[in-house]
Image: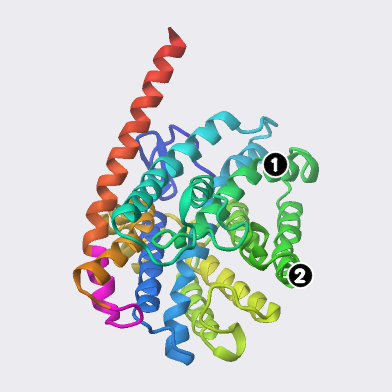
């Protein structure tokens, strides 16, 4: 399934709009991932991270984060795969890459960070973590995971953005090494997949040594690298798969469900926390998340033109629309949840009802996310147009 080129039209399940290429169901999957993150936070906030199978199951809805990471790997590695297939030997335009990543991630994030800290001036937060100018600077610069006590209430989910930003910075170097050094600018998928496998091995190795480095090292980017690499491997496999049997999608979904349920077994994947203390539990849990996220993405990545229920559900217009604002939803949902449940409903932390917390948070977060996305993206597009005009002048 060849990668689409800019300007191609509607082939192999790719949707072309506003100069962009995408598989609509992959965008819908973003909505599922964001909803899963909100759901697990609703379970945590209401005190349902209990040390039994059900409590672990609620905690494992954090699977939304590995899905986001694997999607990033799949989508962002495409230019490097394309240059190998085209034989051009021209590395992607790094200025264009950096600008696209900045305008997609940073403006909305900065708006939410500043809002949370301004809100803290009139709504005191008893938790001192991430407070003050140092906390603000660290959160604005995606450095809050490097050292203890910098994750701000209402922004704790942004640890994953710090990891994602590190991947954005590293990807051009990784892409160059894989294309120039490993493949010598030739399409050698077997060699490429072996190199990606070696790169993925960094994560379990890091999990084993991280506790001896620093308390927060378990949250640093190397611990999650193989989730991105799983998506990158799917980018390569998408060029090799020529036939997708009808049973393959149900099989992938069955694998994803099995992996999700196994991850909830207390004896295997550790307590209901993002990073287990035990290295073996951390590796098992992270590996299961890799399997689940890859299995959910594989049918959409390897058979984008399929028309099964899974593709139709995630490719439906409401799901795609929600997927388009899933990043902004992810940004705002925690502070919205905190304000709603404490200040509006008067709930105490670790009490309450999961469905009510999730639904009320979503009812407020969705329009807030839409507004944030609209304002930030239109502002960045206007800036881009002004820059191009001044450049021509």
Residue 130 x/y as whole percent: 49, 58
Residue 212: mark: 2
Residue 21 x/y as whole percent: 43, 41
| Range shown magenta | 348-362
Residue 83 x/y as whole percent: 64, 37
Label 2: few (<14), some (14–19) or many (≥20) C-alpha neighbours in 10 Å: few
**As rendered, which of 270 and 241 lies closer to the eye?**
270
Q: Does residue 269 lie above or below 362 as drawn?
A: below
Asked if residue 8 is among those painted magenta in the image, a careful observer would answer: no
At 34% from the left and 80% from the top, the residue drawn is 46
At 48% from the left and 38% from the top, the residue drawn is 102
At 74% from the left and 37% from the top, the residue drawn is 185
Residue 173: mark: 1
Q: Quadrant of the C terminus?
A: top left
Report if residue 14 is visible in the image.
Answer: no
Task: Classify mark 1: helix, strand or loop.
Answer: helix
Residue 100: mark: none
């Amino acid at each position: 399934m060849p990668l689409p080129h800019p300007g191609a039209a509607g082939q192999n399940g790719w949707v072309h709009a506003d100069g962009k290429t995408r598989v609509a169901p992959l965008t819908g999957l973003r909505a599922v991932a964001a909803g899963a993150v909100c759901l697990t936070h609703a379970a945590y906030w209401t005190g349902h991270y209990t040390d039994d199978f059900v409590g672990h199951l609620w905690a494992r809805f954090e699977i939304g984060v590995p899905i986001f990471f694997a999607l990033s790997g799949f989508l962002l590695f495409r230019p490097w795969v394309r240059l190998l297939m085209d034989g051009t030997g021209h590395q992607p335009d790094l200025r264009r890459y950096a600008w696209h990543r900045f305008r997609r991630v940073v403006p909305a994030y900065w708006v939410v960070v500043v809002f949370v800290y301004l809100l803290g001036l009139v709504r005191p937060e008893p938790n001192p973590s991430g407070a003050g100018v140092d906390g603000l600077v660290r959160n604005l610069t995606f450095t809050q995971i490097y050292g203890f006590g910098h994750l701000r209430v209402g922004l704790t989910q942004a640890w994953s953005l710090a990891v994602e930003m590190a991947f954005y910075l590293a990807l051009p170097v990784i892409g160059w090494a894989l294309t120039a050094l490993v493949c010598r600018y030739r399409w050698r998928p077997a060699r490429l997949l072996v190199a990606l496998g070696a790169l993925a091995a960094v994560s379990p190795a890091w999990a084993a040594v991280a506790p001896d480095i620093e308390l927060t090292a378990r949250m640093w980017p190397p611990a999650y690298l193989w989730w991105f690499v799983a998506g990158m491997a799917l980018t390569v496999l998408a060029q090799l798969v020529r036939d997708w049997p009808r049973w393959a999608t149900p099989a992938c979904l069955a694998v994803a469900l099995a992996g999700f349920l196994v991850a909830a077994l207390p004896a295997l994947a550790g307590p209901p926390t993002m990073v287990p203390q035990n290295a073996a539990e951390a590796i098992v849990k992270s590996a299961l998340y890799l399997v689940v996220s890859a299995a959910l993405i594989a049918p959409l990545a390897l058979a984008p033109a399929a028309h099964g229920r899974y593709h139709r559900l995630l490719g439906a217009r409401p799901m795609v629309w929600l997927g388009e604002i899933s990043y902004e939803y992810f940004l705002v949902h925690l502070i919205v949840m905190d304000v709603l449940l404490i200040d509006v409903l008067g709930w105490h932390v670790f009490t309450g009802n999961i469905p009510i917390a999730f639904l009320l948070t979503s009812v407020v977060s969705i329009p807030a996310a839409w507004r944030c996305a609209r304002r930030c993206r239109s502002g960045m597009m206007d800036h881009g147009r002004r820059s191009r005009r001044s450049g021509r002048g």
